[in-house]
Amino acid sequence: MSLLLQQIFQEIDRLSLQDQIEVLTYAANRVKLQISNAKPKYRVTELLDIAPGLQETEDDRESVDRSIDERKMPLLDFRQAAGLGQELWQSVDVEIYIQQERESWD
């Protein structure tokens, strides 16, 4: 990978995840536009030029895993979900509901 591309990706890595998605989506759309604007006989050549760079490598996967780890995303605690949706169940007779569910298993 060229030094320029390495610098570009280092800058992209500093962005928020949402901004990274926007930048990479924009870049992908530019590539699609460039290929679609090429003369038909050159489209295959353009695709073959970029195809090797699209293949994921082990280093790519490790880099993504490392960047996810570095973000230190908070762990979700399922115990905080206690009581969610209780208003939906207020009018339901639990015994009848369970009986209906069990009958549907047969």
Image (cartoon, helix red, strand yellow):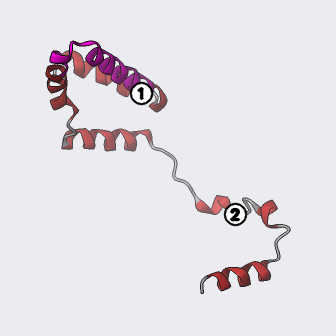
Quarter of the image where one finds residue 97: bottom right
Asked whether, in this view, residue 76 is left or right of residue 69, the answer is: right
Asked whether, in this view, residue 59 is left or right of residue 69, the answer is: left
Q: Which residues are magenta?
A: 20-43
The quarter of the rendered structure image containing the N terminus is top left
Q: Residue at x 85, y 68 (%)?
A: 91
Percent position of residue 76, x then y: 55, 54
Using the image, tell me which numbered label, if any, was put on residue 49.
Answer: none
Percent position of residue 44, x then y: 16, 23
Return the residue at label 2: 82
Near mark 1 (Cα within 10 A), the count class, few <14, some 14-19 or many ≥20, is some
Asked whether, in this view, residue 77 is left or right of residue 69, the answer is: right
Sequence-first tag of 1 and 2: 1
Please tell me which residue lies in front, 27 or 102. Answer: 102
Vertical side of 77 occupied by 27: above or below: above
Q: Which SS class for mark 2?
A: loop
How many numbered discs sit on the rendered protein? 2
Percent position of residue 59, x then y: 20, 40
